[in-house]
Amino acid sequence: MSPRATAVEGVTSPRGAHSTSDDAFVRVEHAVKRFAIHGNQLFRRSKEAVHAVDDVSFTIRRGETLGLVGESGCGKSTLARLVTGLQPVTSGTVVFDGQEITRLSRAQLRAVRRDVQMIFQDPYGSLNPRRRVGSIIGDPYAIHDESRGDERKRKVQELMEVVGLNPEHYNRFPAEFSGGQRQRIGIARALALKPKLLVCDEPVSALDVSIQAQIINLLADLQHDFGLTYLFIAHDLSVVRQVSTRVAVMYLGKIVELADADELYERPRHPYTAALLSAAPIPDPDPARRRQRIVLRGDVPSPVSPPSGCRFHTRCPKARQDCVTVVPDLDAVTGSSAAHVAACLHPVVDGEDLGAAAAVIDQSDQAEIPALEAIEKITAGIARSVDDQGSRA
Amino acid sequence: MSVVIAEVAGTPEPPGGSPEVAGAKIAGRSPRALAWARLRRDKVALVSLGFVVFVVLVAIFAHPLSQLIGQSPYKPDRGPNGLSPSGIPVGPSTHHWLGTDDQGRDILSRLMFGAQVSMIVGLAATAIEIAVGVVVGLIAGFYGGKVDSFLSRFMDVVLSFPFLLTALAMSARFGNHLSITIGVIAFFSWSQPGRLVRGQVLALREREFVEAARSLGSSDLRIMFVDILPNLIAPVMVYGTLLIPVNIVAESTLSFLGLGVTIPKASWGQMLSDASGSGLYQVAWWFLVFPGLALLLTTLAFNLLGDGLRDALDPRFDRIGKG
C-alpha cells in the first residue's frame, strides 16, 4: 500500500488548490494527432498523413461525465487514447490533474496510468482468452506490484462483487461469460487501482440493448460511489444524453460543438450537430413523424486532406463563401450561455428550418475531387500492405 | 468469501445465465481441459501418444531393460548365438530376439540405447529451437518496424543455409559430441518456429487486450510474456511436436553420415549406416529392417500425435507446411 500512497500523493497533493481555483481536471490544448500513411516507396516515407485529431482543445471537470459523440472515423477513439496517454500527441498538450502527461517518460507515465483507466469497446477482444478472470482483474495489482496471494484474491473478489459478478467465478475463463458480464470484468479491472478518470470508449455499443442499460447504470453507480470522472465516447446519441453532464460533438478530427447535455440537445448551434440529432431515432411515433430530418449530402471527406476552412462546409446546408476559407474557432454563440461553444461562422438560430436551407458557395470541384483522390490513395495503400502481409505469410 | 448468493441473485444479469444456480460446483473447463477432452476422442492420436510414451520409457530405462534381457549393446557375442561360423550375423532367436549385427552385438539392446539418443537429440534440439524461435519471433512481431526487418532477414539467412553441407562442416570442425549434434540441428531449425510465432504475434498485438494491458501500465516484457505468450502455446506445441521427428531424422542422417553417434555407441541412424555400409543387410535383413522400423514408427507416431494435437488445441489452426 505504501508505494501507492506516495505515488498518489505526488500527483494529487495540489488537489485542494486545484478544485478551488480551476475546475479543469483534464485540460487538452491544441492536441494534434497525425498518422503517417505508408506509401509504396521503399525508402521514402510518404508525406501524407491521416489527420485523426486536429487542433482540439477542451477540458473535463472533476466529477463530471463528458460525452463525446461523432460518426465512425471522426477521431473520437484517437482523442481518447491521447487523453489516456496510450498514444503520443503529434503536438499540443494534455494536462491531467495539474500534470502535463504529454512529455512524460515511460516510468512517469506508468504512475499516471494508475489514475487514468480505460474501458474498451469490445468485451470479447479486451479480455485475454487464455487467462482466468481472477488473473485478468488482478492484473493491475500484479503490474504495479501491489498486494499478493490471498490479499490480492480478496481484493479481486471484492471488485467482482462491486461490478455485480459472482466472486466464485474467480477461476473461470472469459469465454464462459456473456458479453455484459465480460464488460463488467473489464470495468472491474479498470477500477482495481482506484483511478480518478475513466475513459469509456464506446463501452456499450457492442452490447445487447437490454444489457446496455445495466452497464450504464453500473457506471453511474460507480461514478457516485468512487467519485469518478468520465470521458464517455459513443455514437449513440440517446446513451450519451442520458449519462453526460456535458457533450462534445466531433467531426473529422475537430470538436465542432460543446455544451451542457440538455442545452446541446435542445438548441444545437452547429449545423452538423443539428443534422446528427435529427437522425437519432425517437421512440415516440408522433414527434418522430413531425420532426424534420436533415439529410446531409455526400460522404465524410477524407481525413488525409480535410477540406479547407470549416471542415463541414462541403456538406453543410448553411455553408457560405467564407466557410471555405476561414477556420472557425470554438466560441460562445450569441443567444446561448457562455458555456455553449460551437465552431461555426453561421450558427443555427432558434426555430430555423435547416432542411430548407441551401448552401451558397462556389462548390465547383475544389473540395470533393481531392478528397476522392485521397481516398483512392488510401485504399491503394491498404491493398498494398495487405499484399505485403500475404506474401510474407 | 462467504457466499454472496443473495446479492448475486439480485443482480440484473444472473451469472452463468443458465439454471445452474450459484452454489452448484461447476468447474470451469479450461482451454487445456477442453483440448484434452477433444484429444481423447481421437483414436489415432491416442495410439500415437501411447507409442511415444512407450519409446520414451524404453529410452529412459534402456540400461536396466537391456540387463533384464541379459544383453549388452556394446559387447560382441562371439559365440554361435552371435555370429555364424562364417562370421555372418545370426537372425532373431531366443538369445537375440532381433538378431545380431556384424560384430555379434544384440540389435534389440542397441535399438533401446538408440532410442535414448533419438529422444535426447529430438527433445533437446526441439526445446532449443522453440525457445529461441519464440523469443525472436515475439520480439520481431511485437516491435515490428526496423527490429522486425532485421530479425526477419536474419531468419531468412539462416533458412537459406544448406543444412547438410554446413552441418558436415561444423561437425568436422567441432567434433562428434552429442551436444554438437544438438547444437547444429537446433541452429538450422529455430527460424521456422520463429517465423510462425512472428506471424501470430503480428495478429495478437493488435488485439484490444494488449492495449488494455498497456493502459494498465504493463511493461513491454510483461505484455509479451504474460499476455501474448499464453495465446501462442497451442500453435507452438503443435509445431514442436512436429519438429521432434524432423530432428530425430536429422540426427539419424548425421549419424548415418558418420557425424553423430559413432561406434560402439548406438543410434538408429548409425545402425542403418552400419548395415548398409557393410552390405550385410543383403543376407541379414534384420540388421537393416529393425532400426529402420524404429525410426519410421517413432517419426510417424510423433507426426500423427502432432496432427491430433493441432485438431484438439485449435480446430481452426491451419496445416503447417514443412520446409
Image: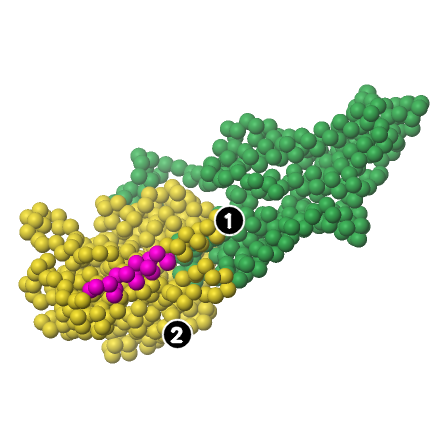
Dot 2 amino acid type = Gly
Q: Residues within 10 Å of mark 1 (few under 14, many from 20)?
A: few
A380 to the left or right of A389: left
Instruction: Give the camera-side residue of B242 and A310.
Output: A310
Residue A37 drawn at (x, y percent): 40, 62
User: Is residue B316 visible from the viewing direction of this image?
Assistant: yes
| Callout 2: SS | helix
- Identified at 21% across, 64% down, the residue is A364
The colour applied to the residues of chain A in this rendering is: yellow
Residue found farthest to the right: B85
In the rendered structure, which segment of residues is drawn in magenta? A363-378
In the rendered structure, does residue B4 fall within the stretch colored magenta? no
Quarter in which the N terminus of chain A is drawn: bottom left
A8 to the left or right of B51: left
In the rendered structure, does residue A369 fall within the stretch colored magenta? yes
- Magenta segment's dominant SS is helix
Q: Is A367 above or below relative to B165? A: below
- Identified at 68% across, 50% down, the residue is B161
Do tag 2 and tag 1 residues touch (Cβ < 8 Å)? no
Q: CA distance from mark 2 to mark 1?
A: 51 Å
Residue B267 drawn at (x, y percent): 77, 37
- Identified at 12% across, 62% down, the residue is A358
Dot 1 amino acid type = Ser
Q: Earlier in the sequence, mark 2 or mark 1?
A: 2
Task: Report the chain holding disc 1.
Answer: A
Dot 1 corresponds to which residue?
Answer: A391
Task: Report the chain holding disc 2.
Answer: A
- Identified at 30% across, 73% down, the residue is A30
- Disc number at residue A10? 2
Q: How many marks?
A: 2
Q: Is B22 above or below relative to A301? A: above
The colour applied to the residues of chain B in this rendering is: green
